[in-house]
Amino acid sequence: MRKKNSPQRGNIMAWFAAFLAFVAVPLAALTIDVVRAFYVYTHLQAATDAACEAAAQALDVSTFIRTGARQIDLGLGASYAGREFAGAVVDQGVVAYSPSLSGLRLLSPTVAECRATASLTLFVPAASPALTVRVASVAEMRVNRR
């Protein structure tokens, strides 16, 4: 049997403090980073989808009236896409990420492709200083003739 006042008494506190400092706290911070990354990914994808749908609805009216051909006006589409994207990522200051609509191009006269990126600063900087999230979306113009 051990003595009641043994020098090993309370040794578990040191081990528990070391466990918290080197395992539990970094793991909790990493968990927060993963959740934030998924949040940014889903919101960035929704914003890109909205931007691409808006760009796809930018009908080149003069060409449509003159020839009846449906095609996207790229300049107007970029304006629509930028407005929708900016409106969809209004929470960027709360979550601390920097989104940008990085590309809009036409795959055909009636199909637009949008690309977006966001940079997310991590709580655990040892892994990497920032995480870059990239998404893409494709939308087709829908115009009905009367």
Image: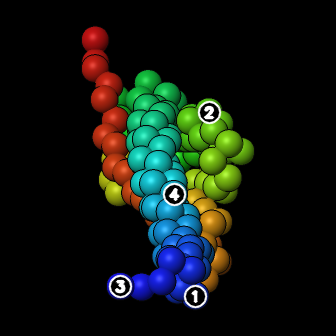
Q: Are marks 2 and 4 in contact (CB under 8 Å)?
A: no
Residue type for callout 4: Ile
Separation (CA) of disc 1 from disc 2: 64 Å
Separation (CA) of disc 3 from disc 1: 14 Å
Separation (CA) of disc 2 from disc 4: 26 Å
- Residue 94 drawn at (x, y percent): 68, 42
Report the quarter where the C terminus lies.
top left
Helix, strand or loop at label 1? It is loop
Residue type for callout 3: Met
Using the image, determine if residue 116 lies above or below residue 53.
below
* Count of numbered circles on the image: 4
Report the quarter where the N terminus lies.
bottom left
Residue type for callout 2: Gly
- Residue sitting at x 62%, y 33%: 87
Residue position for label 3: 1
Helix, strand or loop at label 4? It is helix
Visible residue check, residue 11: no
Q: Are marks 3 and 4 in contact (CB under 8 Å)?
A: no
Comparing labels 3 and 4, the label whose residue is closer to the camera = 3
Q: Are marks 2 and 3 in contact (CB under 8 Å)?
A: no
Separation (CA) of disc 2 from disc 3: 71 Å
Comparing labels 2 and 3, the label whose residue is closer to the camera = 3
N-terminal-most mark, 3 or 4: 3
Comparing labels 2 and 4, the label whose residue is closer to the camera = 4
Q: Residues within 10 Å of mark 2 (few under 14, many from 20)?
A: few
User: What mark, if any, has residue 7 been given in the picture?
Assistant: 1
Residue position for label 4: 32
Q: Is residue 139 left or right of residue 12?
A: left
- Residue 107 drawn at (x, y percent): 35, 57
- Residue sitting at x 63%, y 39%: 91
Q: Residues within 10 Å of mark 3 (few under 14, many from 20)?
A: few
